[in-house]
Amino acid sequence: MLVFVVVRRDGDLSWPLRRAARVHGDVVGVTAGDRALTYAELARRVGGLGTALAELGIPFGARVGFLGANSLAHFECWLGVPAFGHVLVDLNFRLAEDELAFMADDAEVELLVVDPDQLEVARALRERCPSLRHLVLDAPAPVAGDCLAYEDLVARAAGAPRGADPDALAAICYTGGTTGLPKGVMLSHGNLLSNARHNLVATNHRRGDRFLHVCPMFHAAGTANVFACTWVGAGQFVLPRFDAEAVLGVIQRERISHTALVPTMLGMLLDAPRFSTADLSSLRNVQYAASPISPELQHRVLERLDCDVAQFYGMTEASPTVSQLSPEEHRLGFEGREPHRTRLASMGVPVPGVEVEVRDVSGEVLGPGDIGELWIRGPHIMLGYWNRPQATEEALVDGWYRSGDAAYADEHGYLFMVDRLKDMIISGGENVYCIEVEAALSSHAAVLEAAVFGVPHEKWGESVHAVVAVSPGADVTQEELIAHCRRSIAGFKVPRSVDVQLDPLPKSGAGKILKNRLREPFWAALERQVG
């Protein structure tokens, strides 16, 4: 089946839902828990949200936050907040309060939608962030007097989307920063619509699909398919969090045809006791993204899932899709055919509508096999970093985004990741910036130096490991340092293991800690196992 996408320059993020409500109004568009809404009903609720925000005096272009797990409200905020001219700031509820306070204050969030589990954190943020005027609680029970009720907002008379220029800001998505401070990625209406078009072509979404959203919606991987699926009137199912048994149950009960998972989730799914007996015959397409996949897990997935399997590479700054390793490449590679077998280690090729070049430090384009930095161009590339003009200038050059990822392309344009120029660990699909963890470790009185890096982990892809040099005579244990970190940074950033030593960390002639020397033994051991 061919998909033809007509590009309109005047599109905004109200377009997918407007089309779905008009063309597929009687189709059940979203199911979350015990709630199932047709696209017509969904459009009415989203319209009510738009009316309520206007009545509350939230001005055009103001920032509206969400803090909580996946839910119907979370889904509706992505469809509704930008459609009515506001900017969605989707906050990672797994972060520490200090990190969330920085983001909410930096973006000047005026209204925050929150689920019950995060209410106390939201109240603390309201005390710390002068701009935060309203808390909206998404809960079925009577709502406390210091909060508005989300269901009251969506029950208002539906307003019409205000429309927006394609270059208007639609969302600010925070990522970790190599300076230690998170950076707000500014995504426009045009950016997110372009990504939806790219996914329509790459995945061939259509009416009749039944897509399961289980990756966290605060993460780019969790929302990459929302607008594409809505545009064509596909059925969408929302789970609050990943649980392998629950996912298998939903796939079987709801006849799920499509889903997107991070590799860690795939591994848990295959290891679940119910996997061998679950009816997964409805599955047609499983996407994996957000972190590296081990060859062993990739092999198990292709062996045990009887459906199309595709890998996607991207980043928040690209809204997020950049490249795809297609289902055909996966199957031919799994059969041992060359060059497809070798390509199983690649990130595939850029999706239609995206340009990628590998360049050297001077910006010159490199040839096949030469390692350099990935430069990316397309209508999906961010506007820049919120309140970070210098970081924006460094990242965006003549219409290209400098990814910070080191890679090479083969003679057919297949991209192979070599390393990440940015000092980052990807553990279970979450980005961990080493400098943040090193700062937390170094704040302990006994620590003189700290080096943090990723080491292989069978379940999470990578885990956070630290090597610290302590003061002479210091008596500090791995457990104490881990507990110390847990008080100041999010749990998924906390080191899972720490080597404590008295000797100074190895350094270059310029005094830079040689992380490669510390990291190499862990990855060399993995290579020996794979070989």
Image (spheres, rainbow, N blue to C red):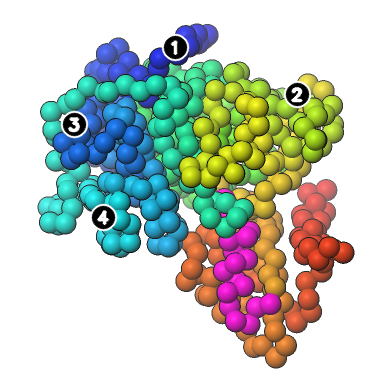
Q: Distance between the residues labelled 3 and 4?
A: 24 Å
- In the displayed structure, does residue 275 sit left or right of residue 331? left
In three-dimensional space, the C-alpha distance between marks 3 and 1, rounded to whole angstroms, equals 26 Å
**Kind of residue at badge 1:** Arg
Asked if the residue under mark 4 is in contact with the one under mark 3, i.e. CB atoms within 8 Å, the reply is: no
Where in the figure is residue 285, as x and y percent of width and height? 52, 27
* Relative horizontal placement of residue 10, taking residue 17 as reference (left or right): right
Asked if the stretch drawn in magenta spans residue 512, the answer is no
Q: Are marks 2 and 4 in contact (CB under 8 Å)?
A: no
On the question of residue 45 being in view, the answer is: no
**Which range is magenta?**
431-448
Q: Distance between the residues labelled 4 and 1?
A: 40 Å
User: Element at badge 3?
Assistant: helix
Residue positioned 71% across, 46% down in the render: 421
- Looking at the rendered structure, the kind of residue marked 4 is Pro
Q: Distance between the residues labelled 2 and 4?
A: 48 Å
Please report whichever mark, 3 or 4, sits nearer to the chain's N-terminal start.
Answer: 3
**Disc 3 designates what residue?**
51
Which residue corresponds to mark 2? 413
Q: How crowded is mark 1: few (under 14 residues within 10 Å), some or many (20 or more)?
A: few
The image shows residue 102, relative to residue 306, as above or below, that is below
Between 125 and 259, the residue placed more toward the observer is 125
